[in-house]
Amino acid sequence: MSDPLIACRGLCHTYLRGTPMEAMALDGVTLEIRPGEVVAIIGPTGSGKSTLIQHFNGLLRPTAGEVRIAGEDLWAPRADRRRARQQIGLVFQFPEYQLFEETVRKDVAFGPKNLGLPAETIAARVDEALRQVGLDPGRFGDRSPFTLSGGEMRRVALAGVLAMRPSCLVLDEPTAGLDPRGKEELLERIAALHRKGMTLVLVTHSMDEAALLAGRIVVMQAGRVMLDGSPHEVFAREDDLRRIGLALPQAARLVRLLRGRGMPVGDALTIVEARQAILAAVRGMGRGAH
Amino acid sequence: MELTRYITVGQYLPRSSPLHNLDPRTKILATTALMVTLFLIPSFAGLGLLAAGLLALLALGQIPLGYALRGLRPIAVLLLLTVFLNTFFGGGDAGRTLFQAGPLVATEEGFRRALFVGLRFILLVTAATLLTFVTSPVELTDGLEWLLHPFRRVGVPAHELAMMMSIALRFIPTLLEETEKIMKAQMARGAEFGQGSILRRARAFVPVLVPLLISAFRRSEELALAMEARCYRGGEGRTRMKELRWRTADLVAGACVIAVSTVLVRLR
């Protein structure tokens, strides 16, 4: 097995330590993300998801425990955290609010520029990143990011991180606030990145998105990892999930409902799986009637 | 990186202490009285006693001392500058010369004044922070509005001023949080803050300031809309959910402040 790209061991984080508002957000998280994986992190609000991912590129300093990126301890005395920030591309929630430049091209170039790359390389990367998110550099490159639609702005912000050529993309609620088409388009772009070898970590409140994209699901609760496994393993624990305020994907709920009404449907987590399971069940019932 | 850790001005700490329970008007008036007293106190002894008094009040309000002192950090530069200027220029020619650095002469009198002014400055800020620690923004506004009310006849928009102030106070932590978030997002794109020459450092903040300003405008528009949606139309005819009421405790607190101020101002 290959080395983990991100490895946290006993990771703890306390906000505002030493003040009256002290709050523990992470309480001993041990977690590994391997190259090529798609991991969804789910959990109720305040369970520590966003704090956790800010440790993946050294934006926060652990109160206790360690974080290793490709084997290197992020907080060792001579650690190169800038390199970690290039390798692990972090896209915050509502990333369109961080756009600031006059043109789309300049904004996307911000990251590569900070890496100290030569101008031609930057230009090439900017165009490549814009295409990756489905924006034509010729059409959008010279426009002001503030004249774009919300979905387009979000894709520009995503391009701004992709232009740094990270090997892993960490996205915090990437589809929050987008309309259904915007959501679908963005998810398709993200899936395409994975097909080209990008490791993905996805923080989401949508069980459907987690079931659709992820090969592994990590459930956070009160600063700890509560469950960690394949979507089928995690969503088999319906009672545990319900207890902390989470639910099953819609497709899983549908097949359960049908089963409750006496239809012999197999398990399903996504719409496509549900369709197959229901069709198979209908065919089976048809044969039984003859 | 936690900005809220360092900037405590305007921060309210919800507790249920005798100080929290006082009428906001009492607290505003008492703080103002103490601040005026600070400028009238002639001796180190007076300042020392006032410092002791403030420490007692912090304890009474259940504010951890370390947390209160943290509020002084952002003004440290200003404080040092004040002390520096007073040491070299505050004493005039009077007093024994302590040491000399080129044309700069530090006199004993100057140094004494520098300490005095520095201490006064620290106490001033601590008193102001104490007020916001133990008074919620809503209470502050209500108190201020009541106190400004008599000046309405001469055209002072009491309600509007109080509302503006409370909104400003309310947004300090929000904007700090926002700043932190944007800084982190830009750091994730390889930005570095606090490195290089002053010009470089200043430039590094453009990617933070532009989104911050945009978001502040967006927030203010949303807030205005939310207020209008709840039929806000200024102070005319507006009633309160919580009426301000003087209690015995306010009387006692007021008397204490007056007594203490009178003594301190005369203490040589």
Image (cartoon, coloured by chain):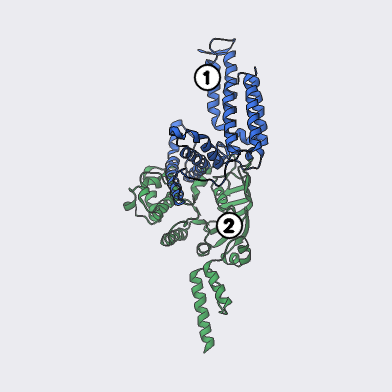
Chain colours: A green, B blue
Residue with the mark numbered 1: B85
Name the residue: 56% across, 21% down: B83
Image x and y of residue A166, in percent: 48, 51
In the picture, which quadrant includes the N terminus of chain A?
bottom right
Name the residue: 45% across, 41% down: B208
Note whether A103 is above or below B97 in the view shown: below
Residue with the mark numbered 2: A44
Tell me where residue A228 sits by quadrant. Answer: bottom right
Please give the label number shown on residue A116: none
Numbered marks: total: 2
Three-letter residue code for mark 1 = Leu
Relative placement, left or right, of A27 versus B92 is right
Three-letter residue code for mark 2 = Pro
- Tell me the crowding category of disc 1: few under 14, some 14 to 19, or many 20 or more residues within 10 angstroms, Cα based: some
Note whether A263 is above or below B214 in the view shown: below
Q: Which chain carries label 1?
A: B
Q: Is B62 in front, or is A52?
A: B62
Q: Is B116 in front, or is A37?
A: B116
Quick check: marks 2 and 1 in contact, CB under 8 Å? no
Label 2: element kind: loop
